[in-house]
């Protein structure tokens, strides 16, 4: 047995323990979650809809169903196992999270880390705050992150050695990531250009063309569909959106920038500063974007990341550094354009970027560990470990506000409201647990989300009315006051939220 095989033999227990912990975390988070996230409801109902609808019909069911692979995967798992859609989704998400954990750890090894870095990598990914926060959500992002990290692993391999096997593995992983989120297609288009920046690489053009070939093949396939089946292309959900995104993103960013700059001039800046409004707003957007990244990475990881860069704790080979930096830059391009268009970034949208940035953190921890013979380094190492654990406790211990009141109200409606009775519910999650609308939930929800639907006494047209009144939303509170009757049941939630259930007597 050679040295490399012996090293692998000594390291597999680390992967095994990390994998078991990841599965336990997924089970723990799923078991304590009492209310499914709104996107998750769409995926679950879409998976169930495959039993009665065609794929094209399922894609029209709700917004997230327009990219149907994840829902279809849940449906297949349900069919094979007999599990419910919820259990099937949780099992699949746990498997995807496991793949993410193992791929992250393997990446640190491929980038040159030893056994100690591997242990730190497990520590970092298993205690990553936002990554663990997302475990509770039923979203297609879990599959995207898993195959995104696997594609990075094989992208590194491609830059090390150009073989058909490495290119096919890279393309296959990135294709799987794209099936979960359309952003994967942007990586297909941009990553091959990274090969052109390889230092002292005579075959850089050949490598770039080899990496670009899967994207070219996909483009030809889409073009063929457009020529022979034009209706299929315009109805294929996110593919059509991707074309719009590529052609219209510049104009959308400029329009959003000018509109928000005008609002800044009108409401915030004094007249004397109006001429600098564009520069002020541009710098504000940059700072705002990077604050989002720091919050997503977590402050302690951000500090360790800067420490790794400053001390060169990660002495990666140039090809390895190029691969990781390329993935970081493509993520920045995708998320920065989205942010400039919408002035908003969900935390989930940044997790692929923060997982990539976190690859430096295990190397920073190792450097602190090795240098801890001196008192300052020993204190810094202990403080870093302490704050990493501390930042993850809120997720693991579930210290956030509970939505059990919403589940309780929905369960009561499901048991006590007759199926033939007309029921108005202004909240999609409450409607899901009330089990009154079935697969028509999203169609019904679209017509009931506006308070005007109950204006002028229209609530008399329903046998029951269930209102979710949020503490910061005066519109539905005004509707409840306008009904001028006491609710038959009230469920109180955090932050002044409440669910009011009325029997109208009609």
Image: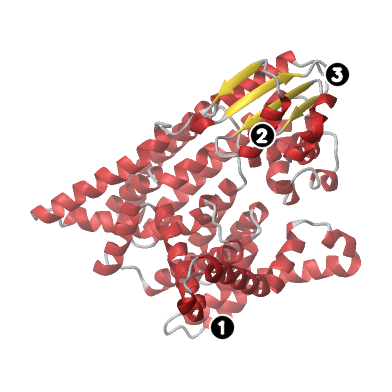
Residue at position x 52%, y 26% in the image: 31
Mark 2 residue element:
helix
Q: Could you tell me which quadrant the C terminus lies in?
A: top right
Q: Which residue is mark 3?
A: 420
Residue at image coords 71%, 42%:
71
Q: Which residue is mark 1?
A: 205
From the image, state whether disc 2 or disc 1 is nearer to you. 2
Is the Cβ of the residue at disc 2 closer than 8 Å to that at disc 3?
A: no
Which mark is first along the chain, 3 or 2?
A: 3
Q: Is residue 378 left or right of residue 88?
A: left
Camera-near label (2 vs 3) is: 2
Between discs 3 and 1, the one toward the N terminus? 1
**Residue 269 at what x, y percent from top left?**
48, 70
In the rendered view, tell whether residue 373 sits above or below residue 455.
below
Instruction: Give x and y (percent) for residue 105.
Output: 40, 51
Residue 206, image quadrant = bottom right
Q: Give x and y (percent) for residue 381.
A: 20, 51
Q: Distance between the Cα atoms at labels 2 and 3?
A: 28 Å
Query: Which numbered disc covers residue 478?
Result: 2
Badge 3 crowding class, 10 Å Cα cut-off, few under 14, some 14 to 19, many 20 or more, is few
Residue located at (40% from left, 43% from top): 126
Q: Nearer the viewer, residue 338 or 276?
A: 276
Mark nearer the N terminus (2 vs 1): 1
Residue 177 in picture, x, y percent from top left: 61, 55
Secondary structure, mark 1, is: helix
Rounded to the nearest angstrom, the CA distance separating label 3 from label 1 is 67 Å
The residue under the point 51% across, 39% down is 135
Please say if 331 is above or below 352.
below
For discs 3 and 1, the disc positioned in front in the rendered view: 3
Q: Secondary structure at mark 3?
A: loop
Residues packed near mark 1 inside 10 Å, few (<14), some (14 to 19) or many (20 plus): some
Q: CA distance from mark 2 to mark 1?
A: 65 Å
């Amino acid at each position: 047995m050679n040295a490399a095989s012996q090293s692998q033999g000594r390291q597999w227990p680390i992967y095994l323990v990390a994998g078991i912990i990841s599965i336990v975390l997924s089970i723990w988070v799923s078991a304590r979650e009492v209310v499914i996230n709104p996107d998750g409801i769409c995926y679950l109902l879409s998976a169930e809809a495959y039993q009665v609808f065609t794929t094209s019909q399922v894609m029209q069911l709700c917004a997230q169903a327009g990219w149907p692979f994840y829902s279809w995967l849940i449906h297949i798992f349900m069919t094979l196992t007999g599990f419910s859609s919820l259990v099937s989704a949780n099992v699949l998400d746990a498997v995807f999270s496991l793949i993410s954990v193992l791929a992250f750890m393997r990446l640190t090894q491929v980038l040159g880390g030893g056994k100690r870095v591997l242990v730190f990598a497990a520590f970092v990914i298993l205690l990553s705050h936002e990554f663990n926060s997302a475990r509770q959500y039923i979203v297609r992002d879990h599959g995207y992150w898993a195959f995104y990290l696997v594609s990075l692993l094989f992208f590194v391999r491609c830059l090390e050695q150009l073989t058909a096997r490495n290119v096919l593995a890279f393309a296959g992983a990135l294709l799987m990531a794209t099936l979960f989120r359309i952003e994967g297609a942007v990586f297909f288009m941009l990553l091959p250009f990274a090969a052109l920046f390889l230092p002292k690489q005579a075959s850089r053009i050949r490598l770039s063309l080899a990496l670009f070939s899967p994207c070219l093949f996909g483009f030809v396939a889409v073009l063929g569909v457009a020529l022979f089946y034009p209706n299929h292309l315009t109805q294929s959900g996110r593919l059509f959106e991707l074309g719009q995104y590529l052609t219209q993103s510049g104009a959308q960013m400029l329009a959003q920038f000018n509109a928000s700059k005008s609002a800044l001039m009108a409401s915030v800046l004094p007249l004397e500063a109006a001429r600098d409004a564009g520069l002020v707003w541009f710098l504000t957007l940059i700072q705002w974007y990077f604050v989002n990244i720091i919050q997503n990475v977590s402050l302690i990881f951000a500090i360790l990341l800067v420490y790794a860069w400053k001390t060169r704790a990660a002495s990666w080979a140039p090809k390895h550094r190029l691969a990781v930096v390329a993935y970081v830059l493509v993520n920045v391009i995708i998320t920065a354009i989205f942010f400039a268009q919408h002035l908003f970034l969900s935390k989930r949208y940044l997790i692929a970027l923060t997982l990539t940035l976190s690859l430096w953190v295990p190397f920073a921890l190792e450097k602190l560990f090795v240098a801890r013979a001196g008192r300052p380094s020993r204190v810094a190492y202990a403080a870093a470990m302490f704050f990493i654990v501390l930042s993850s406790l809120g997720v693991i211990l579930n210290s956030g506000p509970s939505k059990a009141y919403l589940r309780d109200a929905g369960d009561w409606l499901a048991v006590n409201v007759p199926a033939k009775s007309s029921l108005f519910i202004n909240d999609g999650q409450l409607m899901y647990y009330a089990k009154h609308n079935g697969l028509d939930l999203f169609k019904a929800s679209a017509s009931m989300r506006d308070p005007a639907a109950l204006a002028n006494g229209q609530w008399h047209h329903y046998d029951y009315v269930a209102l979710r009144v949020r503490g910061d939303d005066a519109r539905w509170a005004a509707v409840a006051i306008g009904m001028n009757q006491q609710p038959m049941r009230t469920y109180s939630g955090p932050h002044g939220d409440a669910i009011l259930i009325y029997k109208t007597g009609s």
